[in-house]
Amino acid sequence: MLRPFHLGWQSRNAPNNRAMRLVDDVAGLTEKRAEAEYVRVLRDFAGRHWQTEEMFGERFAEVENNLKLEAGRFSKVKRQLIGAYFCHEYTYAAAALMNPSIVPHPDQSGMTDDACRFVLSLRAVGEGHISSIAFREGIAYKDGTFELWPQASFATSVDLEDTTLTDSVDGVTVHRNRESSLSNTVIFPITEQQANGLEDLRLVRFDHGNEDYEWIGTYTAYSGSSIRSELLRTRDFRAFDLQPVRGRAGRNKGMALFPEKVGGKYSMIGRQDGKNLYLLKSDELDCWDDEGVLLMEPKYPWEFIQIGNCGSPIRTDHGWLVFTHGVGAMRKYSLGCALLDLDDPSKMIGRVDEPVLTAENSDRSGYVPNVVYTCGAMRVGEQLLVPYGISDSAVGFASVSISDLIERMV
């Protein structure tokens, strides 16, 4: 994909001296040489991306505004060429692809009772080990099968609503390109706190009551030196609010929101001490100042090092079904699950004593070996569709009936 290229740290507010010298270098070219260079750029890149020349024009406008350039100083060709110098080609999933979550799509038109259109989120890692959020769309069926919609060879980044807010501590709003599909959209780090990545989005379709749905995700914003839990909120997957989680609980990773209020309060599962799972409650969706109550500790050998949640709890007739991950000997990750009481999720009804999914054979090899991991599953009828990361290098899909999982619990 095409992305803005910044001279210095990846911020629109990077120092301008190098940028100004680059603009002056292009301005000093003869028109003939500028035209030849621009033709070369188009030959190399126009066929590889979508709306390439429009992107160059938009990027020049940003540079013009940031550097306070004189509008009439440059010919059209030089404006486009300057825009090209301030762009670069970026492969957003070149290093790793992992940690998916899945939710029902806002658009269920044309679906029957046997099928559900879905949105899949992915953690994609590119050059510089920068984590971003990518999406895929598809259809899941009650028999456990699914279809993924095609994905183009290019992608587009979301646009920041207010470009002055890259150092915001209160959150930002971004928009999907109006002509791009969700499957070809990527959300990159924007604020200073997010500079090194948006990690492990756990999406859930949250019911505010009477099927008033909002899609909410918890993720980790990593600055390169510190972490903070943040929320992604959207009603349509076209506009996204990215905002920090306020309160003491926001300093930790791996928070997952229940899909509805429980006992009149918002509820989350989090790993507050790096090893065990806790149940958190709050009166405010974006403020979690409760340290929570201990919910689960490592109990079996395959999870002795630590456990964590693998996405939001799923409502069933039997209770809240929660997928977990455990880390055992040789830092091998496995998936487990537990069942919590519907009315009082601090009460555990049961949990599996052996993993329900673990890395075997070819799934053991990859960027980070011996890992299977999910950030959320989706219920379709009495079946669950479980996307999972394979050694941080690929994504697989598993399906299982709710009754089979319940039967395995002790």
Image (cartoon, rainbow, N blue to C red):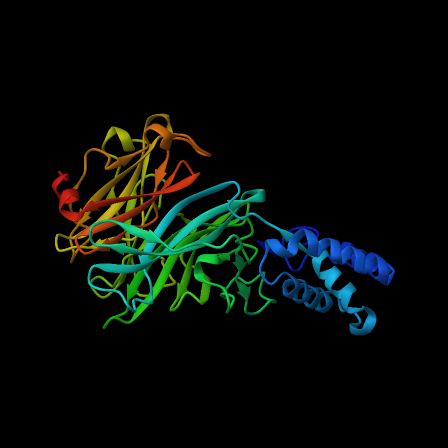
Total of numbered circles in the picture?
A: 0
Q: Say whether residue 31 is visible.
A: yes
80 vs 347, nearest the viewer: 80
Q: Residue 376 versus residue 53: which sits nearer the camera?
A: 53
Residue at 46 percent of width and 53 percent of height: 133
User: Could you tell me which residue is drawn at 63 percent across and 63 percent down?
Assistant: 55
Question: Where, quadrant-wise, is the C terminus in this rendering?
Answer: top left
Residue 6 falls in image quadrant: bottom right
Residue at 37% x, 35% y is: 371
The x, y position of residue 403, in whole percent, is: 13, 46
Q: Position of residue 200 (x, y in %)?
A: 41, 48
Spot occupied by residue 12 in the image (x, y as percentages of width and height)? 65, 60
Q: Quadrant of residue 332?
A: top left
In the image, is residue 396 above or below residue 178? Answer: above
In the figure, is residue 176 to the left or right of 258? right
Q: Is residue 250 visible?
A: no
Q: Residue furthest top?
A: 330
Compared to residue 319, the image places residue 352 above or below, namely: above
